[in-house]
Amino acid sequence: MTTDDRSDLDALRALAGPRTVTTPEELARLRYRVLRGDAPRTRSNVRAWLAPVAAAAVALAVLAGVAIALNRGGGGQSPGLSPAPSGSPTFGETLDPQATLAELQRVAATTRPLAAGDKDQLHVRADMIVPAGGPNGGTVPQVNDAWYEVQGFIAVRAVSDGRPDNAGPKGESLTDLDRTEFREQGPGPRHPTPQWLAGLKPEPAALAQQLGVTGPGNENLWGTCTQLWVLADPLLPADARVGLLGLLARLDGVTFQSVTIGGQETVAITHVMGRDLQVFMLDPKTAHVVGLAVLQRGGAGPSPTPGVIDTRPSPGTNRLEMQWLYSYELIKP
């Protein structure tokens, strides 16, 4: 891991735990640095890890219009915010990579995105575990909500544990900064639109070109793919979901693990970054995202499958550092 990579991950930890920042001005500067990419590599890695922390105000108000949630049971659309599991991950067996990838891609190919109109908004909630800060360390729960315009994923409201969050480092509106960036850059991984998502290819090489991740750097590919998936999961077409799986599976050292969280069985794609194990959890029945976790690794035990790298932390040595469990609903005016 490079110094820049470690700096970005440290900044991410600090941002996830605002209690560690001493003044609102420091929090605003740090938040802008991470979300807007002023720090090296942050632009591609971090924005949608913290997608629910992206812009403005109001705590879970009753919104005008019709809310359509992603049904995690595979039944399509249903009213209300889809529930996320609770708890922390428990690692099971290491899975055969080829067979697991093939099954996930088979399921992904059967999915359909929610039908979003141009004026719709996507409400994203992250039930989080974040560093508590202070000399005693530990973690604390946190809930972040954000509402995005689906055209460009412009963040128009957000709250973190009931606190409004829309100020940039100079007091500017992050919503306005999002609009400016989208206007200047157009659709892409940071600011997708349903139309742009519909054009993504299932072939990994072609998709890598579309996402701009053809150069070296595992963290860049990992971050871009997981960020886009977390940000736009309910709107991802089947081809995009299949292609993202193929890209993630190409990374050096990636493994597939059985992970249970809150009683829900998931398939996790795991990726090592320095001393950290990043865990991207998917519902094996629907190929929708469940969440992300970052664990500080212990030693790895022997693999039960020949030729498969076992990245499970040794019993008693793993430590959950951060976690995001996602739920979504589409808001129609």
Image (cartoon, grey):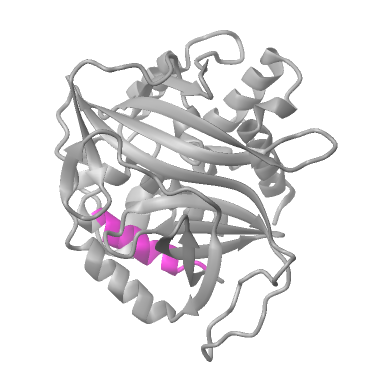
- Looking at this view, name the residue that lies furthest to the bottom: 306
Q: Residue at x 35, y 66 (%)?
A: 246
Q: List x then y, in percent, for residue 328.
A: 32, 38
Q: Which residue is drawn at 41% across and 22% down?
A: 178
Question: Is residue 52 highlighted in magenta?
Answer: no
Q: From the viewer's perspective, tell me whether residue 168 is left or right of residue 331.
A: right
Instruction: Please determine whether, in this image, residue 50 is positioned above or below residue 97.
Output: above
10 vs 304, nearest the viewer: 304
Question: Is residue 244 highlighted in magenta?
Answer: yes
63 vs 219, nearest the viewer: 63
Q: Can residue 51 be seen in this view?
A: yes
- Looking at this view, name the residue that lies furthest to the top: 171
Q: List x then y, in percent, for residue 95.
A: 45, 78
Q: List x then y, in percent, for residue 35.
A: 54, 30
Q: What type of secondary structure mainly makes up the magenta span?
A: helix
Instruction: Please determine whether, in this image, residue 116 is positioned above or below residue 299.
Output: above
Instruction: Please determine whether, in this image, residue 302 is positioned above or below residue 34.
Output: below
Viewport quadrant of the C terminus:
top left
- Looking at this view, name the residue that lies furthest to the right: 135
Viewport quadrant of the N terminus:
bottom right
Numbered-mark total: 0
Q: From the viewer's perspective, tell me whether residue 322 is left or right of residue 194.
A: right
- Residue 25 falls in which quadrant of the image? top right
Q: From the viewer's perspective, tell me whether residue 86 is left or right of residue 67.
A: right
Q: Can residue 217 be seen in this view?
A: no
Query: What stretch of residues is rendered in magenta?
Result: 240-252
- Residue 238 falls in which quadrant of the image? bottom left
Q: From the viewer's perspective, tell me whether residue 32 is left or right of residue 317.
A: left
